Amino acid sequence: MDGKMYVTLENEEYEICGVIGSSTSDYYDYKMVLNIDCLGTNVLKEICRKDSYTIELSSNITSLDNSYSAVFGNIRSVDAKSQINAKKLNSKGESDVVKALQGENMKINVMVYVFCIFNCLLMSQFWLIQRSREIAVKKIYGMSDSRIIGAMACNILALSVTALIIFAVSAVIINVVTSGAGIITVNLTTLLTTIAAIAVTIILSMAYPVIKILHYDSVEVLGSDD
């Protein structure tokens, strides 16, 4: 080979003239530069089939206003009815791929977290139903509502701490198995975010049981069991 890089498009081989990217960006943000004068028949046919096109003008030294005016005029001269939407971006070469992926991951995380909260609410309700007689007996023998609620909080906190430990151990194992690919990054921010999420989950999970315990009628509960 001649030491040059090539890419195959529509079964046609093209020399890569350059690469546009950034040292702070990931490899999938890079853009290959090809010579437009060397486009083959297959690629041109594929381009002509498209209904819309994205044309990107880039420069790190001069203004692109004149270039934009020239491109705009050329497009209008070919298709006077064409619809052109333009926007100006100031960047360092990174594309929006990473931000888009982060946004999608955040949406998934929020959906999963909301599902977990609803699941915890259902679990707390079942916990209350299962221990209704126990709570009634404790209240009859003089145990205060605060002690009953505190015991329930300790049970939920123990489960949450166990979940946090499992998360940390799983993250370490996954990173070791994947040779440090960074699928799960454990740092102070991640740890604090996880603790905050667990705290919010505990508070929301205890809301319904606390209201029920404060308005508990022990005689009615024991009488219904009999």
Image (tube, rainbow, N blue to C red):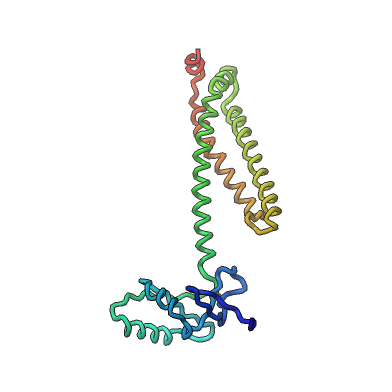
Q: Is residue 226 left or right of residue 53?
A: right
Quarter of the figure with residue 131: top right
215 vs 30: above or below: above
Q: Position of residue 14 (x, y in %)?
A: 53, 79
Nearer to the camera, 26 or 38: 38
8 vs 171: above or below: below
Q: Is residue 57 left or right of residue 131?
A: left
Nearer to the camera, 188 or 178: 178
Residue at 55% across / 71% down in the picture? 94
Tell me if I can see residue 23 in this picture: yes
Residue at 38% across / 76% down in the picture? 48
Residue at 55% across / 39% down in the picture? 203
Residue at the far left in the pictured view: 81
Q: Position of residue 32 (x, y in %)?
A: 54, 76
152 vs 179: above or below: above
Residue at 47% across / 73% down in the picture? 10
Report the label total: 0
Q: Position of residue 146 (x, y in %)?
A: 58, 29
Nearer to the camera, 97 or 34: 34
Nearer to the camera, 218 or 155: 155
Tell me if I can see residue 210 in this picture: no
Q: Quadrant of the N terminus?
A: bottom right
153 vs 38: above or below: above
Q: Position of residue 219 (x, y in %)?
A: 50, 16
